[in-house]
């Protein structure tokens, strides 16, 4: 009998195949005390396991498909770096020597300590990096326990043919690549969130995936047929003939659709009634800009510079930052919007200590941190200003919550410009400085902010988090994350209207901008600049090409006139 399971769809598409458990189950970690004379041999056993883990990761890195975004290689590099970090290379042997415990137990303890540190961090990206620690530790643990074959070839299920749907507690980025090379047609995991590396990778490799499907390992049997619906976030095990035919048809339609989309790459994004819409890319690494252009983006609407600061002990200095920014600015044909640092409680993060504040998402993060730690900010600003001569650079300030903050940052940028000028360093004459609107207060104060900002960019990921009071990385409250909540829509509308009244461009760079389900609504609200993961550009473009924007304006206005929530939902449904 068919069984339905729900989770969070993090990578769209339909996958159909046989259930294959990853590694065949949980790791049981033995703990025992060693005789004195075996302690050094145990340290060597740990070092050998680490070396083997490095070999495995290097092999994965070599096998990364060319079409995969550069972020994939960066994920593997992150794991390689962690393997060489003293938090493993020194701390685990010290633990073995100090307590005479076995290598597995020492590694497990060290992993738990590091995970606890990452869990305290306020920046969601950095907090999600605890997954990396867990994954790197698990890789070494599996080697120590001789359980390091991702797919046991001897099982009945893996001996058969046809696509596999990987069912796991969680999937590491490295395993995801490996398994995609082995033909995995989908993933279902018990844990994980839409911002995890694995979720980003699954999207980048276009493999349907569902995370947060609690109990999936217990409920699904090895070898049985399962359908993964990454669009809706559910899985159907042991489907009947009717369901299979329905999903196979959808799969074929999606394949045909992808082929049709590819033909839109060079088509300008102009609506049926002649409105030009700008479709830009969100990138995390300088190298991603070229891939984004390949996928039809006209420029970069958000470059998240914090990735440059991660997984290292020290901050990159001005020259290193300049090199990175100059590279990205000169490689983009159109405009390039670089966001200044959006880190959490920065010093603590970089030195690996936990944040001690109780509400880190509301604490000293992002622009607040930059205004407090002005050396950090000035260094970045100088590097950005120097890079401006290489292209059409815009600077974007994150997490602005009041006009004073924006003006203070503007003044620092002005001062840095004057200093560079004085030193004879060239800086582009005109560099627009804009504000991210991702805090409700900024949306509400948008008319005042618009007098100072050269542009707005709406960061819906945080705007939704702060408006609806839900932690965006907490899967317990994920169900409340609703871009269509009338409070969120009102703030988006207010921001767009305030920008238009002041005559400044308004973009959106949160995930909502790249979700084709919302394109028509956002066009109706007057949005003309969308910045998103490059993989979504063509689908959004197709919606733009088919849209009559003046009709959508009327429809969107009617949403806000709805007399009750049922009618509001109905009007939203009609516009979608
Ligand atoms: C946002 O908050 O919508 C955004 C684009 O920024 P980030 O996801 O990096 O916080
Ligand atoms: Mg944000």
Image (tube, grey):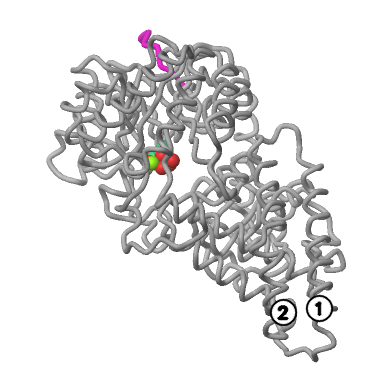
**Residue 253: percent from left, percent from top:** 61, 34
**Residue 193: percent from left, percent from top:** 50, 55
Number of the label disc, if any, that sits on residue 96: 2
* On screen, residue 338 above or below 501: below
Secondary structure beneath label 2: helix
Q: Which residue occupies the foreground of this view, 485 or 460?
A: 460
Q: Quadrant of the C terminus?
A: top left
On the question of residue 438 being in view, the answer is yes
Snapshot quadrant of residue 136: bottom right
Which residue corresponds to the image point at 59% horizontal and 20% vertical from the top-left? 293
* On screen, residue 546 above or below 26: above
Snapshot quadrant of residue 321: top right
Q: Which residue occupies the foreground of this view, 249 or 438?
A: 438
Q: Which residues are magenta?
A: 271-279
On the question of residue 233 being in view, the answer is no
State the CA–CA distance, disc 2 to disc 1. Answer: 8 Å
Apparent side of residue 221 relative to residue 564 in the rendered image (left or right): right
**Magenta highlight on residue 234:** no
Q: Do the residues under discs 2 and 1 have CB atoms within 8 angstroms?
A: yes
Q: Ligand 1: give its quadrant.
A: top left
Which residue corresponds to the image point at 63% horizontal and 29% vertical from the top-left? 287
Number of the label disc, if any, that sits on residue 494: none
Apparent side of residue 486 relative to residue 206 in the rendered image (left or right): left
* On screen, residue 162 above or below 492: below
Q: Which residue is mark 1?
A: 42
User: How many discs appear?
Assistant: 2
Q: Within 10 Å of the Cα at label 2, are there few (<14), some (14-19), or many (20+) other Cα atoms?
A: many
Q: Which residue occupies the foreground of this view, 457 or 137?
A: 137
Q: Which residue occupies the foreground of this view, 431 or 496?
A: 431
Which residue corresponds to the image point at 12% horizontal and 40% vertical from the top-left? 563
- Which SS type dominates the magenta stretch? loop
């Amino acid at each position: 009998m068919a069984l339905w399971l729900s989770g969070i769809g993090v990578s769209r598409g339909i996958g159909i195949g046989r259930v294959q458990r990853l590694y065949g189950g949980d790791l049981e970690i033995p703990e025992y005390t060693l005789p004195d004379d075996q302690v050094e041999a145990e340290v060597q056993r740990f070092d050998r396991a680490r070396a083997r883990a490095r070999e495995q990761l290097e092999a994965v890195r070599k096998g990364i498909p060319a079409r995969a975004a550069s972020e994939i290689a960066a994920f593997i590099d992150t794991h390689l770096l962690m393997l060489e970090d003293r938090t493993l290379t020194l701390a685990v042997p010290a633990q073995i020597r100090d307590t005479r415990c076995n290598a597995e137990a020492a590694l497990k303890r060290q992993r738990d300590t590091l995970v606890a540190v990452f869990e305290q961090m306020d920046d969601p990206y950095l907090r999600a990096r605890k997954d990396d620690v867990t994954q790197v530790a698990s890789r070494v643990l599996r080697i120590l326990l001789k359980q390091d074959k991702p797919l046991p070839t001897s099982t009945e299920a893996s001996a058969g043919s046809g696509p596999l749907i990987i069912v796991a507690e969680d999937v590491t980025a490295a395993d995801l690549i490996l398994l995609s090379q082995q033909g995995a047609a989908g993933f279902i995991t018990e844990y994980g969130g839409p911002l995890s590396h694995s979720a980003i990778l699954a999207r980048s490799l276009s493999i349907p995936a569902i995370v947060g499907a609690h109990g999936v390992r217990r409920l699904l049997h090895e070898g049985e047929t399962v359908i993964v619906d990454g669009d809706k976030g559910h899985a159907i095990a042991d489907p009947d003939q009717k369901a299979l035919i329905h999903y196979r048809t959808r799969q074929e339609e999606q394949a045909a659709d992808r082929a049709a989309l590819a033909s839109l790459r060079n088509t300008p994004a102009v609506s049926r009634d002649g409105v030009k819409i700008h479709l830009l890319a969100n990138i995390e690494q300088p190298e991603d800009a070229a891939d984004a252009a390949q996928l039809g983006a006209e420029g970069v609407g958000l470059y998240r510079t914090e990735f440059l600061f991660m997984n290292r002990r020290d901050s990159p200095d001005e020259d290193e930052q300049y090199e990175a920014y100059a590279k990205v600015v000169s490689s983009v044909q159109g405009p390039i919007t670089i966001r200044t640092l959006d880190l959490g409680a920065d010093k603590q993060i970089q030195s690996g200590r936990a944040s001690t504040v109780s509400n880190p998402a509301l604490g000293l993060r992002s622009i607040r941190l930059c205004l407090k730690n002005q050396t950090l900010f000035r260094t970045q600003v100088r590097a950005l200003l120097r890079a401006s001569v290489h292209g059409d650079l815009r600077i974007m300030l994150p997490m602005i919550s009041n006009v004073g903050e924006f003006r203070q940052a503007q003044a620092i940028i002005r001062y840095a410009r004057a200093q560079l000028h004085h030193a004879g360093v060239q800086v582009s004459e005109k560099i627009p400085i804009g504000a991210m609107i991702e805090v409700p207060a900024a949306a509400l104060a948008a008319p005042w902010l618009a007098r100072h900002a050269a542009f707005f960019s709406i960061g819906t990921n945080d705007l939704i988090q702060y408006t609806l009071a839900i932690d965006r990385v907490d899967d317990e409250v994920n169900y409340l994350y609703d871009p269509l909540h009338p409070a969120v829509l009102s703030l988006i509308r207010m921001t767009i209207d305030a920008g238009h009244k002041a005559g400044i461009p308004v973009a959106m760079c949160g995930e909502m901008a790249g979700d084709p389900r919302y394109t028509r609504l956002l066009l109706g609200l007057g949005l003309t600049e969308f910045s998103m993961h490059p993989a979504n550009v063509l689908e959004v473009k197709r919606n733009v090409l088919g849209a009559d924007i003046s009709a959508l304006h009327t429809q969107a206005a009617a949403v806000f006139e709805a007399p009750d929530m049922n009618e509001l939902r109905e009007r939203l449904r009609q516009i979608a």
